[in-house]
Amino acid sequence: MIRDITLGQYYQIDSVIHRLDPRVKLGGTLLFIISLFFFQNVWCYLLAALFLAVVIKLSRVPFKYIVKGMKAILFLLILTVIFNLFLTPGTPLVTFFGGKVRITEEGLKLAVFMAIRLAFLIIGSSIMTLTTTPNNLTDGMERLLRPLRVFRVPVHEGAMMMSIALRFIPILLEETDKIMKAQTARGADFESGNLIQRAKAMVPLLVPLIISAFRRANDLAMAMEARCYRGGENRTKMKPLIYRTEDYLAYFCVALYLGAGVFLGRL
């Protein structure tokens, strides 16, 4: 399961989505996620599925590679569906244990929509990280958040921190996988037993993982200081972000998607 997490990784290939300005991808992803929580009918979610399918096709990232990242949140997805299915009041459809437990029409609808929202949210976020390098993500976030500098918000430092945290996800996952294999070779068992026993078996992983994370963070800080890194004001870019024709076209496509969503939401 550790190897199945794709969030934070970069899939290197040449595609239309890869070449887009990171500001377009960040803004488009944010608007797509927001739209998912405003959609309330089947037609809107069909539109979101179509929009997502087109983006995946243009990104040239294998669909299996994107979907395998869903395995990591499968438990959370099932738990969310169960809670919405059984705890939402409304018109009963099926009852259990003499009516004490019931599935309502509103609960079934909410559970299905919530599962679709979470799945689309993870897939959409994964496409953004798979098609954007950490450096471009940092530059894109910094440019989008630049207006906050008026309120003395450290925009550059915040964008750098978010980018480093995102980049550390696959690194820590790889480190976790190495530690698990080393402890398995020494007789540790992470597969057998119930859920609580498996959770207890994962506890010995935390100490070496935390030590490794602090070591990597210290090495990164020393490397940045050795290269005289100074963020903030008067810092220039080797590759400044410039909007091109395809970026404006992408903005238009996102606006068209949102307009179609508003129209279908009135049906």
Image (tube, grey):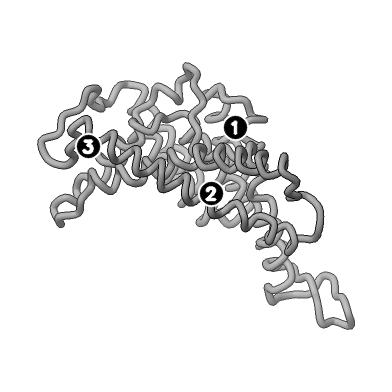
- What's the mark number on residue 225? 3
Return the disc, 3 or 2, that comes first in the chain's sequence: 2
* Image height of 42 relative to 56, above or below: below
Residue 253, percent across and down?
43, 33
* 256 horizontally vs 181: left or right: left
Furthest residue to the top?
14
Residue 98, percent across and down?
89, 83
Q: Are marks 1 and 3 in contact (CB under 8 Å)?
A: no
> Along the line of sight, which residue is nearer the eye, 11 or 49?
11
**What residue appears at the point 82 percent right and 70 percent down from the top-left corner?**
93
Residue that badge 1 annotates:
53
Residue 92, percent across and down?
79, 74
Whole-Å distance between the Cαs marked 1 and 3? Answer: 43 Å
Residue 119, percent across and down?
62, 47
Whole-Å distance between the Cαs marked 1 and 2? Answer: 40 Å
What is the crowding at mark 1: few (fewer than 14 residues within 10 Å), some, or many (at least 20)?
Answer: few
> Along the line of sight, which residue is nearer the eye, 10 or 149?
10
Any part of residue 203 in sight: yes
Provide the secondary structure element on which disc 3 rests: helix
Return the disc, 1 or 2, that comes first in the chain's sequence: 1
**What residue appears at the point 49 percent right and 42 percent down from the top-left corner?**
169
Residue that badge 2 annotates:
208
